[in-house]
Amino acid sequence: MAQPVTPASTSPPSGGLVVARGAAHGLLIGVPAALINVFLADQEPQPKAALNATLVGLLVGFWLAGFIAGREAPTNPARHGALAGLVVLTLVEVIGVLGRLDRGRAISVAAMAVLGLAATALAVNGAGVGARRVARKLSEPTPPGGTL
């Protein structure tokens, strides 16, 4: 006897898909911020305020990656969020390193480590917010005659 086919939307997404979705959302903000940062860092004199704004954009991208991954993760939202943030960090760092090498500047491993720590912390924080948001929605009572 044939087994009934369940729609894909009823099964929770796999861990890799959750991380990929989170990373994709984070990259929507992180990659443009990194590219703008590379462009601005080559200017003389360097526009410090604009460079700081691109850093804020990167940080928002890390948080967003964690938020989306934490919201969609069936289990372990912090782990999924951290992994999504690290994927964004990896691609953003590749852009940054290539930009520094193009300008003939040295690569600072310490700065990369600090950004990695910030990326992980923000992504885990975002994952926690995303997971709490889902938990809150699931704990709300269903309105009579309606759905959530």
Image (cartoon, grey):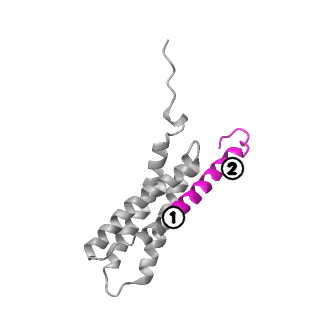
* Label 2–label 1 contact, CB within 8 A: no
12 versus 41 height, above or below:
above
Of residues 8 and 34, the one nearer the viewer is 34
45 versus 36 height, above or below:
below
Of residues 147 and 107, the one nearer the viewer is 107
Q: Which residues are magenta?
A: 120-148
Report if residue 147 lies within the magenta region.
Answer: yes
Which residue lies most toward the front here?
Answer: 109
What residue is pinned by disc 1?
117
Q: Secondary structure at mark 1?
A: helix
Q: Residue at x 34, y 63 (%)?
A: 94
Q: Residue at x 43, y 58 (%)?
A: 88
Q: Secondary structure at mark 2?
A: helix
What's the magenta bit mostly, secondary-structure-wise?
Answer: helix
What residue is pinned by disc 2?
136
21 versus 99 height, above or below:
above
Three-letter code for the amino acid on which mark 1 is drawn: Leu
> How many neighbours does mark 1 have within 10 angstroms: few (below 14), some (14-19), or many (20 or more)?
some
Q: Which mark is residue 109?
A: none
Q: Position of residue 84 (x, y in %)?
A: 47, 53
Q: Position of residue 16 (x, y in %)?
A: 46, 43
Three-letter code for the amino acid on which mark 2 is drawn: Arg
Residue 134 located left or right of residue 22? right
Q: Residue at x 49, y 24 (%)?
A: 5
Q: Residue at x 71, y 42 (%)?
A: 142
43 versus 6 height, above or below:
below
Q: Quadrant of the C terminus?
A: top right
Residue 76 located left or right of residue 144? left
